Image (cartoon, helix red, strand yellow):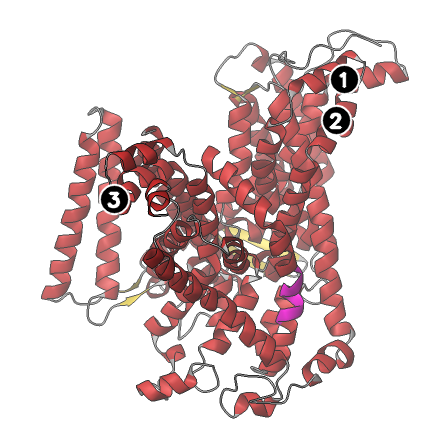
Amino acid sequence: MALRWRTSPTTPTPLGAIISYLILGFWTFVVLFPLYWLVITAFKLPVHVNEGPTYIPFADFQPSLHAWRYILVDLGNDTLRPYLNTVVVGVTSSILTLMFGAAATYGLSRFTYRVRLATALLFLGFAVLAAVGIQLGLPWQLAVAGGLGAFALARAGALRRVGGPRLGNADIAFWMISQRMLPPVAIVIPIYILFQRLGMLDTRPALVVAYVAANLPIAVWLLRDYFRTIPLELEESAAIDGANRYQILWRIVLPLSLPGLVATFLFIFVLAWNEYLLALFLSSAKAQTMPLLVAAQNATRGPQWWYMSVLILLMIGPVIALAIVLERYIARGLLLGAVRG
Amino acid sequence: MRGIPPVTTPQRRGDAVAAPARRIPWSREALVSWADRQAGAVLVLPAVLVILVLSIFPLLFSLYLSLSRFQPVAGGFRIHFVGLLNYRKLLLGSEQEHFLGRIGELGFGGWLAFVVLAAIGLVLLWRSLRTGPLSVSRIAGHTVVAVAGLLALWLAIRTVVATGGRPGTLVVTWAYVFGGVALQFLVGLLLAALCAQQLPGRRFFRVVFLLPMMITPVGVAYTFRMLTDTGKGPFAPLANWLGYANVSWVNDPWGARIAVMIGDLWQWTPFMFIVLLAALESQSPEPIEAAIVDGANRWQIFWHITLPQIGPVASTVILIRLIEAFKIFDMPNVLTGGGPGTATESLTLHAYVLWRSLDYGTSAAVAYSLLFVVTFVGIAYVRLVHRRLTEAL
């Protein structure tokens, strides 16, 4: 035995094992105790909370379902509507993010893109001009059409001959992923004004659109590695058999990367489920999501912890289940992403 | 059907959106074939458009907003261009105390701390400069980092250590980011190193340690509010016994900030843990075995072999967490409401408070300041630390 310990560096000595278990056990307590407290508080009567802490159900206090009844039955629709909003917005935005992200990532991993930097800047310039035009009172249809027309003309004319640096696949992928660096607060006010002008504030579609934009960089980042692992030979033989690009993507690439797609979907679903800042700006009553409902508890009713605990448990139940299922994928996905940067 | 080129060959030269080379009769087959040749553009375009419309344009508009005064009027809004007035307000005007903090009088200890920390920083920068060629761009880059670092240190010390000083949202955000990420990394590394051993029950710890990362931050914030209550929380008897029964952490600025940081530590240590664990488990065993043959002890192996091996991954998770931590919002907003006063407000929360009071221009200026700081720290970190660690391999 002694020899084995010395030769396998990942096997701890007995003393090391005891110390390891002590530290790991301590952190397990740190992680689980808040969750335990949440669960028992959800079954407490107000009197069990207000008269100082009680710790053990049945011994310290008699568990009661009153908070659950109040939240689920008495409040009924006021709880159900935000819950439904969160589910609908989460699922819809994750599906759209996955579709756009998978298409873009596949394109970036199989095609060669060489966009002239000048073209991209020119497009941005005309877009800004169009925006200024709208600000000065032009009808937006005219401004958009004019901007696009001018861009097309300029591209067909002058730019053909201009060289300049070109953006390759790596640049485009980096550009997409680097959007994650952007603090959301730096872009949320214009998005708020945009949806206000469109009359879309406090609607589910507004949240869906915002979440797709927010989570797309993560989807591209995670999916890049899954698509790299699919052998090119399969796609080549499919192409020889007469399949077109979209058939190859739909029939071969997507089925083969299904585990990665599922993991990515669940990951961005959790992000959308937990999102708070964008929801705070873009929704108030009709499209209210669960994080907003929970955060609003304090303002409306004071710290009524038994109700709040029930709401928090309802909100985090699904993600805890997902976390346990996803553990393996998350580690792998994050590591692959982290190594590539 | 037209022949389809092999998948590996580059599809196009020039722009991603190019016109078809020659005219094909309009038929279903021709349409399919045309769509097939445009596949590269079709696949990428939706994502590019989404990011353009919802990231790049808002970002440009935000910049304009931060340089203007925003007035909501009936049926719309009016925007006046005011130049750098909003930034002036943050740095010198009515928002200075909120944003930068209140500058206090520095005693002897404060000056000593400033001089010592500044000297350490400058020596480290000098040594980093000496490792490479002395080109103009490298000297300029290191000088910029040195000046920015000295300014930041001066501001932090004058507002935190000095008597009568009070840190503003900028310094508080730095505390959350640098203090929080350092703690999360150390705890995450310790737990990952322990879990990488051959211990029965490892899988249980891995799943449990992952949980906090997935839990809604708003829920975490409220749970920590319950736990830290000195009257009704689970640790109330302990606080009572220690004589802190009537001391409420909510009313103490640093108590509240530390509560926010503990909540953040609880939530984000799992991210560090899970990535570092995966890195530890995928390191190659040969160098370790060779070191054991040479008689190295565990600590030497960890310090000289394991750490350099996981260096690139460690550096990357720190970079990711640095960038993400600058966006901190949910935890202070729900846990403390930014209070007491504005003591726990982060930059994002500051921008949100200004937005709620309809001061869109200054709010955008705060957001842009945050963007500037994140970008600066990100680039400086990549240039000074990240690149060296990833190139070492």
Q: Is residue A30 above or below residue A208?
A: below
* Residue A299 visible at all: no
Task: Give how far apart the Cα atoms at labels 3 and 2 are.
Answer: 50 Å
Q: Does the magenta stretch include residue A126?
A: no
Badge 2 density bin: few <14, some 14–19, many ≥20, Cα 10 Å: some
Residue drawn at (20%, 32%), measured in percent from left and top?
B129
- For the stretch drawn in magenta, what is the main secondary structure? helix
* Residue pointed to by mark 3: B297
Q: Residue furthest right?
A: B27
* Residue pointed to by mark 1: A238
* Residue A303 visible at all: yes
Drawn side of residue A38 relative to residue B297, left or right = right
The subunit letter for the residue under badge 3 reads B
Q: In which quarter of the image is residue B385?
A: top left
Residues tagged by mark 3 and mark 1 found on one chain of the structure: no
The subunit letter for the residue under badge 2 reads A
**Helix or strand or loop: what does disc 1 sit on?**
helix
Between A143 and A203, the one nearer to me in the picture: A203
Drawn side of residue B51 relative to residue B121, left or right = right
Q: What's the residue type where badge 3 is placed? A: Asn
* Residue pointed to by mark 2: A252
Task: From the top left corner, tell me how far across and down residue A24 is, in percent.
Answer: 42, 61
Q: Give the range drawn in magenta.
A: A312-318
Task: Give how far apart the Cα atoms at labels 3 and 1 are.
Answer: 55 Å
Task: From the top left corner, tell me how far across and down residue B295 is, in percent.
Answer: 23, 38
In this rendering, which labeled residue sits more in front, label 3 or label 1?
3
Asked if the residue at tag 1 contacts the one at tag 2, i.e. Cβ–Cβ closer than 8 Å, the answer is yes
**Helix or strand or loop: what does disc 3 sit on?**
loop
Between B293 and B78, the one nearer to me in the picture: B293
Task: Give how far apart the Cα atoms at labels 2 and 1 are.
Answer: 8 Å
Task: From the top left corner, tell me how far across and down residue B273 is, in percent.
Answer: 44, 51
